[in-house]
Amino acid sequence: MMIRTFKVLSALLAYPTVELRAAIPELAAALDAEALLPAAVRRRLQGLMDDIASGDLYDLQERYVLLFDRTRSLSLHLFEHVHGESRDRGQAMIDLKSLYEKAELAMDAAELPDFLPLFLEFLSTRPRVEAYDLVGQPAHILAALAERLRKRRSPYEAAFRALLALAAAQPKADAVAALMTAPDPDAADLKALDAAWEDAAVTFGPDAGKSCKDELIAKIRAGRRPAPGVADAARSR
């Protein structure tokens, strides 16, 4: 049985589109029907949904790219925050992709397995206890992202607070603090952003010939992944 709340959160963290905006009432209805989120968390999430539903689409898309594609410290690729471009990330990617394949979750060839909306789409297909346990595993990453978004006064903070509310395990303070030491430049500071992306080019697997720039392009492409099943999130009630 699908966990609609994870499906909704996956949609809200995807690249804003006309379809996503039109589906906001259905997504809100799905959240209310399932009622998994605490009332205060649900209210804050409504703020994000209202923002997406009423904002200018071009502005919404530009904001999304500035936050999640351009700013490394806000990357929606989970392994970016723990493995960076190291070879350890390769095995982690393989393991996660294998998990998706066992669940028969289709991936686009350009997608990276650690893209958060894709991970949440996968969680929506799992039994509730398993899904809550899995979302708790990167809880320290989710908490760090929530805190960085809070400092920016971004409505997207609410989506990460919702995920933390669902997680079986809460993040350890020291793990969050360690992540918060990473550079967190403003999206308007192009020099600082360039410096944050300037890691040594360490690649793995069949893409070993690619550079860090190629990897970044893949991430940006994945960041534009259409919101998954926005029209059927509520219809599955």
Image: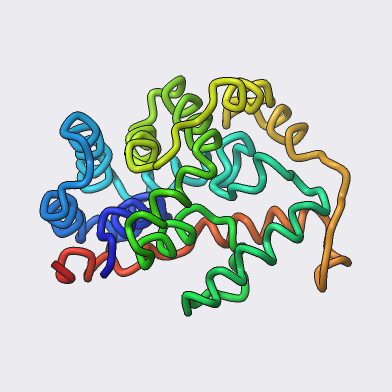
Percent across and percent down for residue 228 are 36, 66
Could you say which quadrant of the image residue 55 lies in? top left
Percent across and percent down for residue 51 are 25, 39
Could you say which quadrant of the image residue 39 lies in? top left
Residue pictured at 44% horizontal, 49% vertical: 133
In this rendering, the count of numbered labels is 0
Residue pictured at 33% horizontal, 34% vertical: 158
Residue in the foreground of this view, choosing between 70 and 102 = 102
Q: Is residue 181 left or right of residue 87?
A: left
Percent across and percent down for residue 53 are 22, 48
Residue pictured at 75% horizontal, 40% vertical: 197
Q: Is residue 140 left or right of residue 166?
A: right
96 shown above or below 168: below
Residue pictured at 58% horizontal, 43% vertical: 75
20 shown above or below 176: below
Q: Residue furthest front?
A: 129
Q: Where is the N terminus found, in terms of image quarters?
A: bottom left
Percent across and percent down for residue 211 are 84, 57
Residue in the foreground of this view, choosing between 155 and 3 = 3
Q: Where is the C terminus found, in terms of image quarters?
A: bottom left
| Scheme by which the image is coloured | rainbow
43 shown above or below 24: above
